[in-house]
Amino acid sequence: MRRDAIFYQIFQRFPNLFFTLLDQSPEQVQGYRFESVEVKEPTFRIDGVFLPPETASPKVVFFAEVQFQKDESLYDRFFSESLLYLYRNRTLYDDWYGVLIFHSRNLEPKNATIHRSLLSGPQVQRIYLDELGEPNQQPIGINLMQLTIAPEERMAEQARQLIERVQQEESGILSKNEIIEVVTTIAVYKFVYLSREEVETMLGLSLQETRVYQDAKAEGERETKVKMVAKLLTKGLSVEEIAEIVELTIEEVKQAAPQSLEE
């Protein structure tokens, strides 16, 4: 499963949660929205952009990249897409920041020499989720982000501890119900093979058939199917045969094939 997909789902619903990683107060980032934007000539699609509200002054745009697999071209792509977007929209913003979120430090590209001035400057921040410290000793927002990298055998216990903590503390970013929605989203992504009842038992919650549950379930199931595509390709099956087996369209299989092989 590509855990970066979890983050993009969460950031889309709760953009303020992103800024807990940057130690920014809720007042400073009120009104930001998380978008996927397209840059033409050449065409790029940037999945993670936090756009300021129209009333913001100054207008600061944040580019975010979540990385859970090795990609030696990451910095080339991240900076070229971000700076091209700024060039195409140079009259809209006063400043920018780049944030790269890694599962661990060993996923960074080996050769960062060409981008050293940007990476060492004040406008770019690299965050390593496995170096943030013990979950229960972190702010609730950070604790939520750490839940995405918890091993499956520890995830349920860690989630229950977080939910218990939410009942006693205020996060300052999200309401208690919103935090439970985030925990549910993460659990469904990581345990796509479980039913709603099994997720309820695991988390000690009573969940309704809410949109957050349904969306996370559907996305999690699709991620599982994408992984299956790569395995079936190695068996010599045709695109049409694979589409029938995994219940995707032929176009979806074609799109998933290179993505699966890269992972």
Image: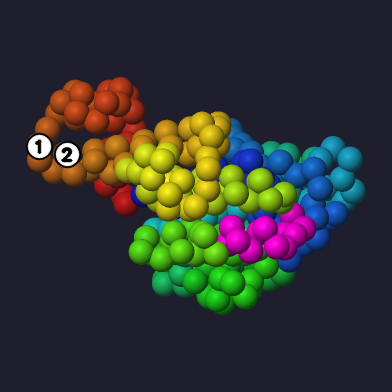
CA gap between label 1 and label 2 equals 5 Å
- Between 208 and 133, the one lying in front of the other is 208
Above or below, 180 against 246 in this view is below
Residue underneath mark 1:
236
Residue underneath mark 2:
233
Q: Is residue 153 something that shows in the picture? A: yes
Horizontal side of 65 relative to 189 (left or right) equals right
Where is residue 59 shown, x and y percent of the image? 83, 47
Where is residue 136 shown, x and y percent of the image? 59, 72
Horizontal side of 107 relative to 48 (left or right) equals left
Above or below, 72 against 94 in this view is below
Q: Secondary structure at mark 1?
A: loop
- Between 14 and 54, the one lying in front of the other is 14
Residue type, label 2: Leu
Horizontal side of 76 relative to 152 (left or right) equals right
Q: Residue at x 66, y 46 (%)?
A: 177
- Between 176 and 263, the one lying in front of the other is 176
Q: Does the magenta portion include 233?
A: no
Above or below, 100 against 178 in this view is below
The image's mark for residue 216 is: none
Where is residue 43 shown, x and y percent of the image? 53, 35
Crowd tier of the residue under label 1, counting other residues whose Cα lies within 10 Å: few below 14, some 14–19, many 20 or above: few
Residue type, label 1: Gly
Where is residue 191 shown, x and y percent of the image? 37, 48
Q: Residue at x 43, y 49 (%)?
A: 201
- The range drawn in magenta is 162-173
